Amino acid sequence: MEVRFRVHRYDPEEDATARYQVYTVDVDGDMTVLDCLNQIKWYQDGTVTFRRSCRSAICGSCGMLINGRNRLACNTRVADLEAAEVSVGPLPGFPILRDLVVDWDPFFAKDAAMKPYLINDTPPPDKERRQSPEEYSKIDNATLCIMCGCCSSSCPVVWNNGQYYGPAALTKAYRFIFDSRDTATRERIDMAGSEEGTWRCHTIFNCTTDCPKGVLNTQNIQALKRKVMLEKLGFTGTKLVFNVDPIYKEGEAQHEHEAGGIATRA
Amino acid sequence: MITHDVIVVGSGLAGMRAAVEIRRKAPQADIALITKVYPTRSHSGAAQGGIAAALGNIRYDANGVPVAAPEDQPGDDWLTHMYDTVKGADFIGDQDAQEILAREAVPTIYELEHMGVPFSRMPDGRIAQRPFGGHTNPRACYAADRTGHALLHTLYGELVRYNVKVYPEWYMLSVVIEDNSCRGVTALDIRTGEVHAVNAKATMFGTGGYGRAFKITSNAFSSTGDGITAAYRAGIPLEDMEFVQFHPTGLFSHGILLSEGARGEGGYLLNGLNERFMSRYAPGRMELAPRDVVSRSIYSELEAGRGAGPNGEYVLLDLRHLGKQKLDERLPQITELARDYLGIDPVTEPVPIQPTAHYSMGGIPTDADGRVVRGENEIVQGFFAAGECACASVHGANRLGTNSLLEATVYGRRTGQTIANFLHLESQGVGAAIPAMPSQALKQAEDELRELLSRTGREIAADIRKELQATMFQNAGVFRTPEKLEAELGIIEDLRERFALISLDDKGRRYNTELIETLELAHLLEFSECIVAGALARQESRGAHARRDFPKRDDTHWMKHTLAYREADGRARLDYKPVRYGPDGPRFQPEERKY
Ligand SMILES: Cc1cc2nc3c(=O)[nH]c(=O)nc-3n(C[C@H](O)[C@H](O)[C@H](O)COP(=O)(O)OP(=O)(O)OC[C@H]3O[C@@H](n4cnc5c(N)ncnc54)[C@H](O)[C@@H]3O)c2cc1C
Ligand code: SF4
Ligand code: SF4
Ligand code: FES
């Protein structure tokens, strides 16, 4: 099947404006968007520039805007797009370095601001710190994140306010605040609950809808908001459980997820 | 010129673990890390199944079912882990290094846990462990089926904690060695297109493996053996390159990995007749025999006409009996991969699989402390390597599953310690001068790039790459014959000539990924010769190297490591060196390898 690819081309030092260039690829059964971009790069036009590495949806290199949605090029089958034409652009809201390649530095700087490492002020035991499967289950979903940027790049608040930490960084904050082994809750809350943190989120759900790994970003941010409130009200125990239900029940999340997606995508 | 006390090339588990260790042990040292992808994009993140350590949290009961071991009676010990590793390696691993791997595994894992790795847990909160091929006891610690990802992101956090300087998307072009002392590297800043010389007292490689020489592979596009080739070009021989691991369960036609954890959790392998064919080849361990054994068994089934599918080209991984709940809980990624790439749901259908090039046992020779060595034991001053690019050799002729994440972290840590000690040596004290970078190094790197960009031939790099990968898989794959290997040597030579006649579409310097792919292809063409030449010379079958004409291991003639040296004309010359043991000689004597 012949499919037309409209690919974003832009070299900030050469081009005044971006343009879209059309390539035609003969697509068979299981080919992914990444397979097609490779075909274009290898056999039609070596100057088409994009990132990729693992081609198995784990390294987070290949997030792109594909037919209007942020996705990973490597796990998006062209057939599943059900379109005769596929448009491929860089992740929106990030500075563009070339064609489909965006600048990651601001994204990683926001992640680093969240102190993405475990802090525990008691000396470690000789063996492992214990963590029950129930305690672990609170962070299981958040640890799925591959830092592909699809979420933050789909968030209208990020587009309008470059300072907002955005969903990926806040999910990172969540991942440590709700890790039973971490003791820096207060410090983390100050960061996540600061002016550029949780309260900027308008619960638009794009970030959850567009996450290719099923990370429940919006729910994490909501849980953080509750946690911030409780902490600020003086309930400082790290083991507070009432009213704090970080991971939504599966069905519930699914429901909101869909509703959120439809309501906000114009 | 850029200068640092230490430059680490590679931000996979080995490189990052080393960097963190140097920060801890030599906090005043100025250290930086160069990587061609952002740290969290490194290939270590793709590792699925687990990381081995004899914690002994789980043991087999009398019926062979994994159960919780009492806390005061660990179900495992490091010596058994070492024995399994020695045997898995088919007795050609270096036992001093294998002992260190097994002994230091336990503290290394606890340390990783303290750093915050989100390991899967037992009900009592201990780290969960599961069975893996070739291991006597269930000793694979895991984070669902995304263990590498969990480790990689945790170590990235440590880089942030210790504020290690990173040069992301910098491509190392060459390593500079003069008078047997390493002076640093040259590197291309991909974003700007500028070439830099990076001068350092200590240079460490953690540049990963070389699976991309093969058509069907589980490896990322970035696993192109850059560090290995750079060392080779700088006069370091490459060790045991012929030992390439083919993992039995790659997704059919894609090569994407379905973790051995799938069999560890109880998955079956079926042929076209619906038989659990492993009963023919390894009745004792069945599906959990080591990878080389299982991959050969699959090929034997296919050749006997017992394959599955319309053309009998694959066998099946059957997970249906594990049930949806277990698959969702323990193997969610695998389920997703099968669905996304083949449109098959493992809950209801068996998954077509075929062996896939997976792991590079060979590489840059090091001693048991991560120092790069030439010849039998001549240390190259200031040059270190760890992880998949290195050959210590802990994996010998065949690596056991879960032992390489372990190698990357144990040896990353240990090599970091070696480097910290090296910096503390009087002459290399942190205040001491950095040995000079030869002035021509930068110019040479720059000239080579310019020459490549100016080529105007008619050959297309992609054609050359495709042909190399297809023929390497055909001719230097699971079963090898002298005829095929000879043919492959000819093909490689031909492809190298054609490579001289390519031209690039992209002649620019900024963010030129076509240029990067072409530099990587040059590496594939160069080290592939070492794989094939080593395989042709080695007239025996050992571990992952299986010769049709020499089906048996031959300890009398071949209990030795291959060394491939690069000659002035660019061809490989082979030499050999003995297997190393600890000060008290071998702990384990060679025996027949049966499972
Ligand atoms: C799909 C898959 C699953 C696996 N599962 C397991 C498992 O369950 N258990 C297990 O023990 N092992 C597993 N392995 C093997 C294991 O993951 C690897 O051996 C290990 O992670 C290698 O780590 P590393 O640090 O040596 O290299 P890598 O993680 O590959 O890192 C290499 C680094 O070098 C950098 N680099 C390379 N070339 C250059 C250059 N020219 N310039 C600059 N930087 C460069 C890269 O950017 C990267 O940062 C698996 C492997 C694969 C492919
Ligand atoms: S829920 Fe909406 S506003 Fe909040 S982070 Fe996600 S996309 Fe942004
Ligand atoms: S939360 Fe999801 S979309 Fe966002 S960076 Fe992580 S994996 Fe990507
Ligand atoms: S290439 Fe790694 S996520 Fe797509």
Image: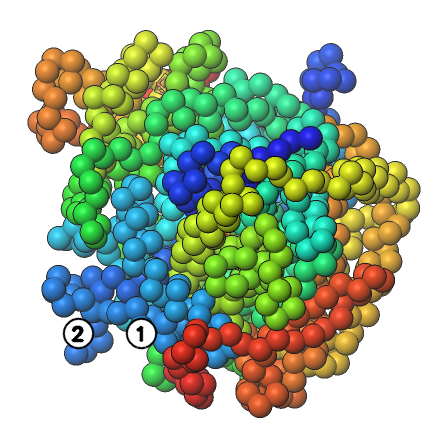
Is label 1's Cβ within 8 Å of ligand 1? no
SS at mark 1 in the image: helix
Q: Nearer the viewer, mark 1 or mark 2?
A: 1
Residue found at x 51% / y 45%: B426
In the image, farthest residue toward the front? B426
Residue A227 or residue A46, whichever sits in front: A227
Q: From what the image shows, is residue A240 above or below residue B406?
A: above
- In the rendered image, which residue does mark 1 sit on? B80
Residue B507 or residue B531, whichever sits in front: B531
Residue found at x 58% / y 77%: B578
Q: Which of the numbered marks, if any, corresponds to residue B61?
A: 2
Q: Is residue B420 left or right of residue B568?
A: left
Residue B451 pos. (x, y %): 86, 41
Which chain contains the residue that carries disc 2?
A: B
Q: From what the image shows, is residue B190 above or below residue B49?
A: above
The reply to whether label 1 and label 2 mark residues of one chain is yes
Mark 1 nearby-residue class (10 Å; few <14, some 14–19, many ≥20): some
